[in-house]
Image (spheres, rainbow, N blue to C red):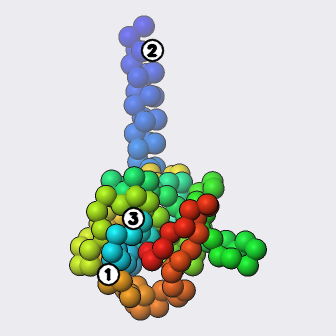
């Protein structure tokens, strides 16, 4: 009887260890680089962060983001609606292809910080955590750059400017 219990216990422990090891290997396949945000302008209550997610392993999906910098932290994108560019929360996550990358940049995917608890200050570093379907939580440190910055390489593309998110307007992030 004890042998059966021991075998079952061993099988459970081995399964859990395998799941933990698989999750760790997925996390090792994910690299986040060039993470940046613009410093806050005045009392603007929101901010946005941009980054590159590189995946050297199997396909995964970013299913969430969290931080304690703001009341809400969300994955966002831009859509064209009635000839107006608007921001919207991403529904269902963001696919990160096998051996590929996803760019979070102005005018595209970004991390939206809604209801900042304090302004984003140039030169500071801020932390968020991306949650992946397979890799789990991946911490990200973001460099806060000056308000006119176009990113760490100066090529961020479209200015984030005045965009609408749902029925709310968010300016200057």
**Where residue 145 is drawn, which disc sits there?**
1
Contact between marks 1 and 2 (CB within 8 A): the answer is no
Using residue 85 as the reference point, say whether residue 154 is left or right of it.
left
In the image, farthest residue toward the top = 1
Mark 2 Cα-neighbour bin, 10 Å: few <14, some 14–19, many ≥20: few
**Residue 65 position (above or below residue 35):** above
Q: Residue at x 26, y 79 (%)?
A: 122
Question: x and y percent of residue 64 in the render?
Answer: 50, 54
In the image, farthest residue toward the bottom = 154
Q: Residue at x 36, y 83 (%)?
A: 147
Question: x and y percent of residue 150 in the render?
Answer: 43, 87
- Screen quadrant of the N terminus: top left
Please tell me in which quadrant of the rendered image residue 163 appears: bottom right
Q: Give the residue number, with chain letter if any, for mark 2.
A: 4
Q: Which of pointers 1 and 2 lies earlier in the amino acid sequence?
A: 2
Q: Which of pointers 3 and 2 lies earlier in the amino acid sequence?
A: 2
Using residue 158 as the reference point, say whether residue 125 is left or right of it.
left
Give the structural element (helix, strand or loop) at label 1: strand
Contact between marks 1 and 3 (CB within 8 A): the answer is no
Give the structural element (helix, strand or loop) at label 3: loop
Tell me the mark number nearer the camera, choosing from 1 and 3: 3
- Screen quadrant of the C terminus: bottom left
Question: x and y percent of residue 8 in the render?
Answer: 45, 21
Foreground of the two, 18 or 116: 116
Q: Give the residue number, with chain letter if any, for mark 3.
A: 45
Using residue 126 as the reference point, say whether residue 62 is left or right of it.
right
**Where residue 38 is drawn, which disc sits there?**
none
Foreground of the two, 117 or 69: 117
């Amino acid at each position: 009887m004890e042998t059966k219990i021991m075998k079952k216990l061993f099988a459970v422990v081995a399964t859990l260890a395998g799941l933990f090891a698989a999750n760790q290997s997925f996390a090792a396949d994910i690299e986040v680089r060039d993470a940046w945000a613009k410093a806050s302008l005045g009392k603007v209550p929101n901010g946005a962060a941009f980054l590159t997610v590189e995946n050297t392993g199997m396909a995964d999906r970013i299913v969430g983001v969290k931080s304690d910098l703001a009341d809400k932290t969300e994955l966002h994108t831009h859509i064209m609606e009635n000839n107006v560019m608007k921001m919207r929360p991403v529904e269902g996550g963001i696919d990160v292809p096998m051996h590929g990358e996803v760019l979070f940049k102005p005018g595209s995917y970004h991390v939206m910080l809604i209801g900042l608890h304090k302004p984003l200050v140039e030169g500071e570093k801020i932390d968020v955590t991306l949650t992946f379907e397979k890799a789990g939580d991946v911490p990200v440190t973001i460099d806060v750059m000056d308000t006119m910055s176009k990113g760490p390489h100066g090529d961020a593309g479209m200015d984030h400017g005045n965009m609408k998110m749902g029925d709310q307007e968010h300016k200057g992030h």
